[in-house]
Image: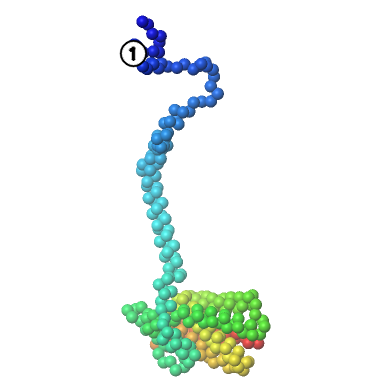
């Protein structure tokens, strides 16, 4: 018995599925069939062309050499930046100027107020390295100048408040003026030492410390004016000015060029160095008066 196409033989329970022809086989398609492409990418793998191109970039020896050269230049630039920063502001040097303790602070304040009784002004060294301030009272520090600067600003605010003249602008002007004067003084000393080619171990931090000790005298003058009036202010100002001048001369003459102390002032360079030292000391009373007189009058 003949069976129509698409059916199995006798006893068969399944039909033989042949190719089904759509009814509108010859009708034009409105959209392209992209199901085959989508199915090829369902596995989660990128297209072969993209993967090969990405690997070729890193497999290229020229690209590897360029990347290594760029990393080398970046590391060299980082080292140069660190060297320049250490040249102008070394953290190790900055830590040295803050290596203080309570005993040193008390001795240093007494030295600033009564320098006339002090005998030995030489900075002590250990293996060509200066001892830290907590081990040598003659060593300069930045702790006392920084704390004295903050105390001066607070004291100026209190003095202005007692005179009914306090305002944030006036207090900010006092703080900026006090800081700028010290910076100008340090720059002037550095320029003077450079012009006369002084060979010394004085650095920027050293000069900043010595010039910053004037804040202690300024505090003394303002406190004297607030407690005892104008007479107390001028007496305290005179004492602080004389003490600071004596301290600056004795300290700087040992730091600018130690050979001048032993060989005398016979050479012209020695006389020029002493002139700079005396000028720096003589400038202190003017700054003390300029930065404190408006707070007590």
Mark 1: which secondary structure? loop
Q: Is residue 61 above or below residue 169?
A: above
Which residue: 39% across, 49% down?
Answer: 67
* Residue nearer the viewer, 267 or 164: 164
In percent of width and height, residue 222 lies at: 58, 87
Asked which quadrant contains residue 130, the reply is bottom left
Quadrant where the N terminus lies? top left
* Residue nearer the viewer, 164 or 79: 164
* Residue nearer the viewer, 66 or 136: 136
Is residue 267 visible to us here? no
The residue most toward the left is 127
Residue identifier under label 1: 11
- Report whether 184 appears left or right of 60: right
Which residue: 67% across, 81% down?
Answer: 165
In percent of width and height, residue 184 lies at: 55, 76
Which residue: 37% across, 46% down?
Answer: 64
Which residue: 63% across, 75% down?
Answer: 168
* Residue nearer the viewer, 183 or 27: 27
């Amino acid at each position: 018995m003949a069976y129509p196409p698409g059916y199995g033989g006798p006893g068969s329970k399944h039909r033989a599925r042949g190719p089904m022809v759509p009814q509108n086989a010859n009708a034009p398609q409105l959209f392209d069939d992209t199901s085959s492409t989508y199915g090829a990418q369902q596995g989660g793998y990128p297209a072969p062309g993209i993967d090969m191109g990405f690997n070729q970039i890193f497999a290229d020896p020229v690209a590897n050499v360029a990347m290594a050269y760029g990393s080398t230049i970046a590391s060299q630039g980082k080292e140069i930046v660190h060297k320049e920063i250490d040249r102008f502001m070394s953290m190790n040097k900055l830590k040295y100027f803050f290596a203080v303790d309570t005993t040193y602070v008390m001795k240093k304040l007494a030295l600033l107020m009564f320098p006339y009784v002090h005998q030995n002004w030489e900075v002590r060294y250990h293996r060509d390295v200066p001892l830290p301030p907590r081990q040598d009272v003659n060593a300069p520090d930045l702790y006392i100048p920084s704390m004295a600067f903050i105390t001066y600003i607070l004291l100026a605010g209190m003095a202005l408040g007692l005179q009914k003249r306090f305002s944030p602008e006036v207090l900010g002007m006092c703080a900026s003026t006090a800081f700028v004067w010290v910076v100008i003084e340090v720059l002037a000393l550095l320029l003077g030492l450079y012009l006369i080619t002084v060979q010394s171990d004085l650095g920027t931090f050293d000069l900043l410390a010595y010039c910053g000790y004037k804040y202690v005298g300024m505090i003394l003058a303002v406190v004297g004016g607030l407690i005892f009036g104008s007479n107390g202010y001028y007496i305290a100002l005179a004492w602080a000015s004389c003490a600071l001048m004596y301290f600056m001369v004795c300290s700087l003459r040992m730091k600018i060029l130690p050979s001048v102390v032993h060989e005398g002032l016979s050479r012209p360079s020695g006389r020029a160095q002493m002139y700079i030292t005396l000028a720096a000391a003589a400038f202190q009373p003017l700054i003390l008066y300029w930065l404190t007189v408006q707070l007590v009058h």
